[in-house]
């Protein structure tokens, strides 16, 4: 959207992208703290990226075929919180006004929380947890290694 209507949408999109980068930096720090060798840490971090970008959604879509419709919708909704890439994708669509192209998880989110702002608030809370928890886990691992 152009003009004064959409002047905050681009900075919000950039902010969401930076949050996703911070999440993956936190995950990479955790992997580096857990792995003893650099090549192993690099491989695990790369696998995590591929997992969240490609495989996670495929697993969720496959998992929905195992459930009845109502349970599958709940499964889709809760699975969204397990993937930071999906959360940023849906939050970006909310911010940019592209709700028409939501995937199944985004549509389930809107149905369960009841609106854009509630959905965005839930997603931002989940993203904050994705930022903080890996950093806290890394801190605990490093403290244990120092003892």
Image (cartoon, rainbow, N blue to C red):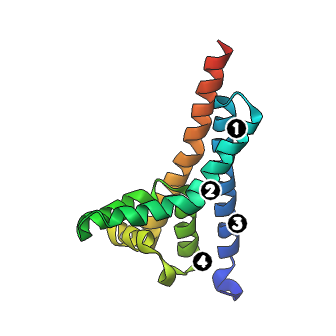
- Say which element carries label 1: helix
- Say which element carries label 2: helix
Pointer 2: what residue? 50
**Would you say 99 lies left or right of 71 here?**
right
Residue beneath the point at 48% across and 64% down = 58
Residue beneath the point at 70% across and 69% down = 11
- Say which element carries label 4: helix
Pointer 4: what residue? 96
- Say which element carries label 3: helix
Disc 4 vs disc 2: which is toward the camera? 2
Residue 112 lies, with reference to residue 24, above or below; the image says below
Q: Are marks 4 and 2 in contact (CB under 8 Å)?
A: no
Pointer 3: what residue? 14
Q: Earlier in the sequence, mark 1 or mark 2?
A: 1
User: Where does the image place residue 86, in percent across and percent down from the top left?
Assistant: 53, 63
In the image, which disc is placed on residue 41?
1
């Amino acid at each position: 959207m152009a003009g004064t209507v959409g002047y905050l949408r681009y900075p919000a999109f950039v902010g969401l992208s930076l949050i996703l980068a911070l999440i993956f930096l936190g995950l990479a720090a955790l992997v580096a703290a857990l792995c003893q060798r650099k090549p192993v840490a690099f491989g695990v971090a790369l696998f995590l990226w591929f997992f969240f970008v490609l495989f996670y959604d495929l697993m969720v879509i496959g998992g929905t075929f195992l459930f009845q419709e109502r349970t599958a919708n709940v499964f889709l909704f809760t699975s969204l919180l397990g993937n930071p890439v999906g959360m940023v994708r849906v939050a970006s669509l909310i911010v940019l006004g592209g709700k028409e192209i939501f995937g199944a998880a985004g549509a389930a989110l809107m149905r369960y929380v009841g609106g854009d702002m509630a959905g965005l608030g839930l997603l931002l809370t989940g993203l904050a947890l994705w930022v903080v928890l890996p950093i806290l886990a890394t801190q605990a691992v490093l403290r244990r290694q120092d003892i």
